Image (tube, rainbow, N blue to C red):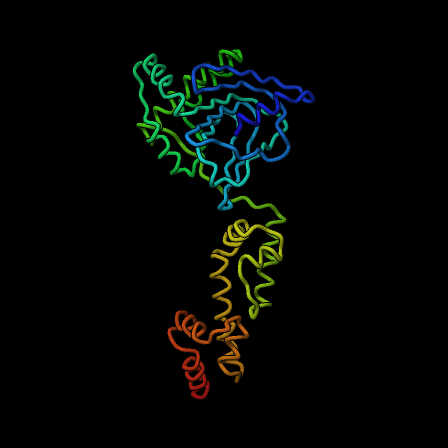
Amino acid sequence: MFETMLEQIADQNSSPKTIHWVTSMTGVRVCDFACYPPLDSIPLILSTHHFEVLFCLQGNIRIEQTDGRSLDLQESEILLLFDLSQIQTIHWSDDFAQGVLVSIDTLKSYESLFQLCSLMGGLDFDPVQVEDVMRRHKGCAIISQNGWIDTVFHTAKQLSPDQRGRYCTFMTIELLYYLSHENDYFTYKSPFSYFDLHQVKTAQQVQDYILSHLDESLTIDRLSRMFHISSTLLKSCFRQLYGQPLHKYIQENRIRQAAKLLLSTNQPILQISAAVGYESASQFGALFKRYYQTTPSQYRKEAKKMSKSV
């Protein structure tokens, strides 16, 4: 993915850049780069059994996941990419980017990596175990706040581009070794939920609309189309703002409104059911009983008894 991006930047004649490729072994490509990254999101292209390890020397990358959460890669941190299926967008947040990319095809490079591991004191790593670790992190992980990381970046910043590329190749092998054998060795950044002001206002508008249109069909797909926001982002933002899933919020407020109508009007239960968005009286009755442990008719009857006794 970043490999494709850097190749595209290298082919451009407009912006100043330094793109230095080092082919250290079969199945492994290394690029030491300093450039102005693209303004648009980076195309999400990554082959199967393919790892990308990005050593960030300068710049900031925002990774937005399909569940609405985000990860930020900052200076002196390492990004590992294996599976893009749960990533929505990746883009640079800064105007200038510098780092080292190590791109590994685990199938083509297996023999070369084995030989390099032997040269590094007999290190070994299990690609299957590394893939399992990455899957637990949804195919994307950022490593930071570690003595090993500090040493790696302190050394890398003092080397020439060619030396730095080869050094980061060795450090990638060491990193894969740790991932294979010591899952607790590194500190992984936790994804966070990030919503801008427009997204928050949109979720608030959705909430206002729900409360004043409880009789309508309020599916998440319909609401996301009406308010021009993705269903994934709407669900995530709404949950953070209001503390519960969107569908549960709708259901709870429908039943509460029904309870108010049962107490304040003499409308038939079928009419109240329709007034809060339920065409099926049986579905409405089952949900009402789940919330109030009694049927709508019994709820109304008991409420009238209590009002007479007061």
Q: Residue at 36%, 15% (x, y): give it.
A: 116
Q: Is residue 298 above or below residue 241?
A: below
Q: Nearer the viewer, residue 49 or 119?
A: 49
Please provide percent x and percent y for residue 249. 49, 62
Residue 18 visible, this angle: yes
Q: Is residue 140 above or below residue 288?
A: above
Please provide percent x and percent y for residue 65. 50, 41
Which image quarter is the C terminus in? bottom left
Outermost residue toward the right?
14
Residue 151 visible, this angle: no
Outermost residue toward the front?
108
Please provide percent x and percent y for residue 117. 34, 16
Q: Is residue 297 above or below residue 238?
A: below
- Count of all numbered marks drawn on residues in the image: 0
Outermost residue toward the bottom?
308
Q: Residue at 48%, 75% (x, y): give it.
A: 259
**Drawn side of residue 63 relative to residue 26, left or right:** right
Please provide percent x and percent y for residue 120. 34, 14
Q: Residue at 44%, 28% (x, y): give it.
A: 51
